[in-house]
């Protein structure tokens, strides 16, 4: 049985979504953020030394367990466990797109959005710094819009785990990073993922999620 240590309003919502797409059985251990700092609670350090979410614990029938952290690593582990479903598609070009966006989500797109969030909590000077950061975010959002103007999903004509990885940063960008109606292909992609039954089922299991 897989146990997902799930922090509210976080990247771990993607793990619940992937598990729902696969139809794999799992349990959810929910954690609430500190209302003042919005950081994860110290209880998560009992599961993994970094004290962050997502973390999954996969126990087999013998009782042995694997503890896996980092969203991308969890996504790759689960796609392998599901015999490659929603993983790397056929064809060299599609496979390359899949690998790119699987890692681009956290490696390139999410960092400036996270900085933007932190700056938004700094009175006065933070707002000024956000305005200077926005052009950097816009470069990424324009790139994403360009890519999605050619195909419905990030790796081509088929929905994959790369789309699941891209969901959180683009939802965050729509919430606070300048992603608006001026980028119709990206907005349409968001509408499409939010309409998926597995996405909605994951919201019911995970609890409050402001980005949906």
Image (cartoon, rainbow, N blue to C red):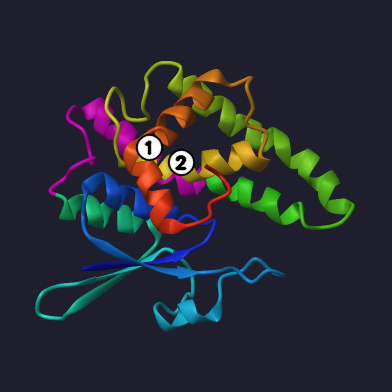
Residue beneath disc 1: 163
28 over 61 or under it: above or below: above
Which residue is at the far left?
62
Residue drawn at (41%, 34%) of the image: 193
Q: Are marks 1 and 2 in contact (CB under 8 Å)?
A: yes
| Disc number placed over residue 66 in the picture, else none | none
| Foreground of the two, 59 or 162 | 59
Q: What percent of the width, then of the height, locates residue 58?
A: 23, 69
Q: What percent of the width, then of the height, locates residue 103?
A: 40, 45
Residue 32 as seen in the image, left or right of residue 103: right
Helix, strand or loop for disc 2 = helix
Q: What percent of the width, then of the height, locates residue 172?
A: 58, 44
On the image, which quarter does residue 182 sit in?
A: top right
Residue drawn at (35%, 48%) of the image: 17
Q: What percent of the width, then of the height, locates residue 22?
A: 22, 47
Which quadrant would the N terminus be assigned to in this image? Answer: bottom left
Residue beneath disc 2: 167
Residue 113 as seen in the image, left or right of residue 160: right
42 over 5 or under it: above or below: below
Residue drawn at (42%, 63%) of the image: 54
Helix, strand or loop for disc 1 = helix
On the image, which quarter does residue 99 sit in?
A: top left
Around disc 1, counting alpha carbons within 10 Å, would you say few (fewer than 14), some (14 to 19), or many (20 or more)? Answer: many
- Label 1, label 2: how far apart the Cα atoms are: 6 Å
Whether residue 102 is visible, yes or no, is: no
Tell me the magenta residue range.
Answer: 83-109
Magenta part mainly helix, strand or loop? helix
85 over 76 or under it: above or below: above
């Amino acid at each position: 049985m897989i146990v997902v240590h799930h922090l509210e309003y976080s990247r771990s919502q993607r793990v619940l979504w992937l598990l729902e797409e696969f139809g794999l059985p799992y349990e959810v251990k929910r954690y609430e953020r500190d209302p003042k700092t919005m950081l994860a609670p110290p209880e998560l350090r009992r599961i993994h030394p970094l004290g962050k979410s997502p973390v999954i614990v996969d126990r087999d029938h013998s009782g042995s367990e694997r503890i896996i952290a980092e969203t991308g690593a969890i996504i790759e582990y689960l796609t392998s466990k599901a015999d490659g479903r929603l993983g790397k598609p056929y064809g060299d070009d599609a496979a390359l797109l899949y690998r790119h966006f699987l890692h681009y989500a956290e490696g390139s797109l999410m960092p400036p959005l996270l900085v933007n969030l932190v700056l938004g909590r700094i009175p006065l000077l933070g707002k000024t710094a956000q305005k200077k950061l926005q052009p950097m975010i816009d470069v990424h959002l324009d790139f994403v819009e360009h890519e999605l103007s050619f195909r419905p999903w990030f790796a081509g004509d088929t929905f994959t785990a790369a789309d699941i990885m891209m969901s959180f940063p683009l939802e965050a960008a729509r919430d606070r990073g300048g992603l608006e109606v001026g980028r119709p292909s990206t907005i349409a992609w968001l509408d499409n993922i939010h309409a998926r039954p597995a996405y909605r089922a994951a919201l019911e299991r995970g609890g409050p999620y402001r980005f949906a």
